[in-house]
Image: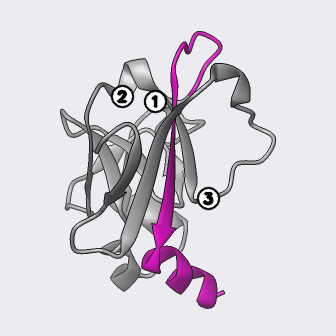
Amino acid sequence: MNFSGWTQMKSSQVRFHISVVPRESFSTDFIPANRAYLDLDKTGKFIFARFFKPGDRFVPLGMTGNKKLKSFFIDRKIPRDLRKRIPILTTEEGDIIWIYEQRISECYRVTKNTKKVILIEGFGKFQEARLEGK
């Protein structure tokens, strides 16, 4: 993904808008589910989008240890057929940084030491389908 502008995820109707934002603009007061604020120095220069793979693990925001993504989905009561359609953003090395509309990884969150923040916003069919189902 580019760090400026729009990127369409293949095999999905979800589009992502990515931008670098000032550290001062980040606030934890309210963050919509379709947005992720991440530490640019930790994510690296490249971010990739894919779908769930068996054996996936990540460190959910607020936790210290990793968790199987399958267990995370089960705990959140996400239907099995929907799990395969949720976009997952990763680093170049394959580390999960954000489960779209669910949770970012503790490892890539913005901290008091963060110098550069990237904002990723997702828009598209997955989000609309999920909202209609509520």
Relative to residue 57, is residue 26 drawn left or right? right
Relative to residue 65, is residue 87 drawn left or right? left
Q: Amino acid at mark 2?
A: Thr
Which label was assigned to residue 108?
1
Which picture quadrant has residue 32? bottom right
| Residue 25 to residue 99: above or below | above
Question: In the rendered structure, are the residues bearing label 2 and label 1 in contact, judged by CB atoms less than 8 Å apart?
Answer: yes
**What residue does disc 3 label?**
33
Q: Which residues are magenta?
A: 110-134
Answer with mark 2 or mark 1, whichever residue precedes in sequence: 2
At mark 2, the secondary structure is helix
At mark 1, the secondary structure is helix
| Residue 54 to residue 80: above or below | above
Q: Amino acid at mark 3?
A: Ala
Q: How many marks?
A: 3
**Disc 3 versus disc 2: distance between alpha carbons?**
19 Å
**Disc 1 versus disc 3: distance between alpha carbons?**
16 Å
**What residue does disc 2 label?**
43
Task: Residue lying at the far right in this picture: please name it.
Answer: 29
x 37%, y 36%: residue: 3
Answer with mark 1 or mark 3, whichever residue precedes in sequence: 3
Q: Residues within 10 Å of mark 1 (few under 14, many from 20)?
A: many
Relative to residue 32, is residue 85 drawn left or right? left
- Identify the image quadrant of the N terminus: top left
Instruction: Pick the residue in front: 35 or 15.
Output: 15
At mark 3, the secondary structure is loop
Answer with mark 3 or mark 2, whichever residue precedes in sequence: 3
**Disc 2 versus disc 1: distance between alpha carbons?**
6 Å
Question: x and y percent of residue 80 in the render?
Answer: 37, 81
Q: Amino acid at mark 1?
A: Tyr
Instruction: Pick the residue in front: 96 or 73.
Output: 96
